[in-house]
Amino acid sequence: MVSSLRERFNAAFSPEAYQAFMQALDAEFDYHIRFRVAETPVFVPAAFRRRLLEAAEGIIDVLCRPDFKALSESAIPDAFRVPREDAHTTFLCLDFAVCRDEAGELSPQLIELQGCPSLFAYQVMLAETYRRHYPAVPPELPFLFGGLDHAAYFELLRRVIVADENPEQVILLEVDPDNQATRIDFLCTERELGIRTVCTSDLRRRGRQVYYERDGKEIPVRRIYNRVIFDDYVQRTDKQAPFAFTEDLDVTWVGHPNWFFRISKHTMPLLKSPYVPETLYLHELREIPPDLDRYVLKPLFSYAGSGVKIHVTPEDLAAVDDPSNYILQRKVEYAPVIPTPDDPAKVEIRLLYVWEPEAARPRLVVNLARLSKGLMIGVRYNKDREWVGGSVCFFE
């Protein structure tokens, strides 16, 4: 989006350079990344950076309201309510589409927000690999925020995730982690923090204490870096823990499960901003909008865009069994802002925050970008395309 940098990058690009870049990523852990990585990073101009951060701060103002917990209480299903919830989320992700406003200026539009972790460790490796392999990436443009460098960033993550515990007693918990597309992030996290990744079905419990096996020894778990997505967990009956997470266990959840529900699509109707598309709870809909074709129907809780209807009809609304678990959101028009060798690519930017226990507000630390040439962001809409996939932003 910075024209001069884009022209320089595209002019210097070659398929051979991209192949070498991908080989370097895979060689880091002798592991082939299972999702598509884009050929290019995103160069974000200073003016759009300011609008992006303005949009994010307005959203965070709502999350910091003293009544936010009361407003989000109905988001947590009784069957998934976990004890020992903390005062606020530990992680926050805000997803913005890059659009154009009526004046033709670049403008962010909120697509989704999440109170759970994302690829906090992998994104650093990705950005550093782009920088090493593409001389056209300016060394002075940061991808981290607040003056953080590699060491300070992972020290912050260590302070939040491991805290004062022995890393041996801290685990990254996921459902079937060896077969998750995001396994590369687990490998990066293990290397940087010295913790192990554990499958939900490999946990054990005696009384209120949780255990896992490490190097042939049974190790008590003190802290759980929670990467479990409940939509995935409830479907994997073969990977269930031998106890319910809703029991009062003697562990600290880092990324408490309740915040996955509290900060989610459920929050969208509470946000009133020029950077947030109009969003309605389906069960509160009094009449069908006359321009229904300009809305998207979304389940409140779904994984990787499943269940989303782009072309909505009145029949689709009538067919919803549980309207309280759906929202109707006005469509946003992604701007094709990145020139590529064929069609220009659209961009979605995820801002990743860490919220330390005693802090008044979350802290922006790193980012993630996704490039698309399809109707939506995601693999299923970009099959057999190039210059699409996961990426990272460098900011003016």
Image: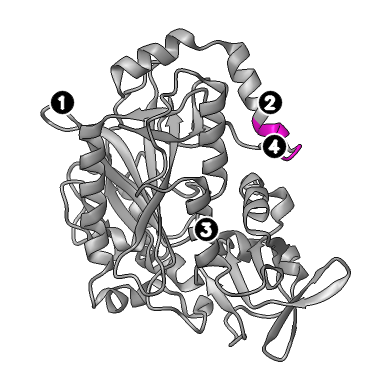
Cα separation between marks 2 and 3: 28 Å
Residue that mark 2 sits on = 23
Residue that mark 3 sits on = 155
Please, what is the three-letter code of the amino acid marked with disc 3? Glu
Give the image's coloring scheme: one colour
Farthest left residue?
A: 103
Q: Quadrant of the C terminus?
A: top left
Mark nearer the N terminus (3 vs 4): 4
Cα separation between marks 3 and 4: 21 Å
Q: Is 29 part of what is drawn in magenta?
A: yes
Q: Is 149 part of what is drawn in magenta?
A: no
Residue that mark 4 sits on = 28
Q: Is residue 228 above or below residue 386?
A: below
Residue that mark 1 sits on = 104
The magenta stretch is 25-30
Write the residue at 57% across / 44% down: 122
**x and y percent of residue 375 in the render?**
40, 31
Mark nearer the N terminus (2 vs 1): 2
Q: Secondary structure at mark 4?
A: loop
Res 313 seen here: yes
CB under 8 Å between callouts 2 and 3? no
Q: Secondary structure at mark 3?
A: helix
Name the disc covering residue 115, or none.
Answer: none
Mark nearer the N terminus (2 vs 3): 2
Categorize mark 2 by other alpha carbons within 10 Å: few (<14), some (14-19), many (20+). some
